[in-house]
Image (cartoon, rainbow, N blue to C red):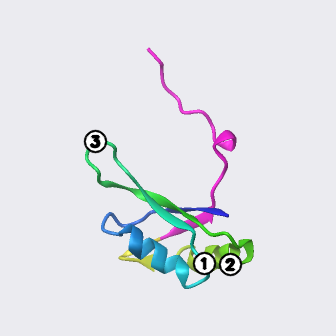
């Protein structure tokens, strides 16, 4: 299951994100989303856990918990096709 993790402190590393979720089961990957120009964290990321039961447990246990001074927002990631289109002009 792909898990969205939001409201991350900018100092959180991918290893810390992985370790936080690894307490609840196997973590296939943990990725912080970064600005393509500066390389700075955008404050959110994704964790992939192959076992849905472990992923559900992690989501319930970690949502609204504090990590480095900020309450995490944790939920199942929505597939790209389910997200609304971004606004703005193409010109």
Q: Is residue 87 magenta?
A: yes
Q: What secondary structure do most residues of the magenta stretch adopt?
A: loop
Which residue in the protein does label 1 denote? 26
Q: Residue at x 54, y 74 (%)?
A: 64
Describe the element under mark 3 as helix, strand or loop. loop
Circles 2 and 1 in contact, beta carbons < 8 Å: yes
Position of residue 66 measured from the top left corner of the image (x, y, whole percent) = 45, 78
From the viewer's side, name the closer residue of 90 and 34.
34
Q: Is residue 70 among the parts visible in the rendering?
A: no
Which residue in the protein does label 2 denote? 54
Q: Of marks 1 and 3, which one's residue comes earlier in the chain?
A: 1
For this orientation, the residue located farthest to the left is: 38
Position of residue 28 measured from the top left corner of the image (x, y, whole percent) = 57, 69
* Nearest-to-viewer mark from 1 and 3: 1
For this orientation, the residue located farthest to the bottom is: 23
Which residue in the protein does label 3 denote? 37
The image quadrant that residue 58 belongs to is bottom right
**Which image quarter is the C terminus in?**
top left
For this orientation, the residue located farthest to the front is: 28
From mark 3 to mark 2, how far is it between C-alphas? 35 Å
Give the extent of the magenta segment. 72-91
From mark 1 to mark 3, how far is it between C-alphas? 32 Å
Circles 1 and 3 in contact, beta carbons < 8 Å: no
**Which image quarter is the N terminus in?**
bottom right
């Amino acid at each position: 299951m792909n898990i969205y993790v939001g409201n991350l402190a900018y100092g959180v590393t991918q290893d810390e994100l992985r370790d936080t979720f690894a307490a609840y089961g196997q973590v296939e990957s943990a990725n912080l989303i970064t600005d393509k120009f500066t390389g700075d964290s955008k404050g959110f990321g994704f964790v992939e856990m192959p076992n849905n039961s472990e992923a559900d447990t992690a989501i319930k246990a970690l949502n609204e918990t504090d990590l480095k001074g900020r309450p995490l927002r944790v939920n199942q990631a929505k597939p790209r096709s389910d997200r609304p289109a971004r606004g703005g002009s193409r010109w």
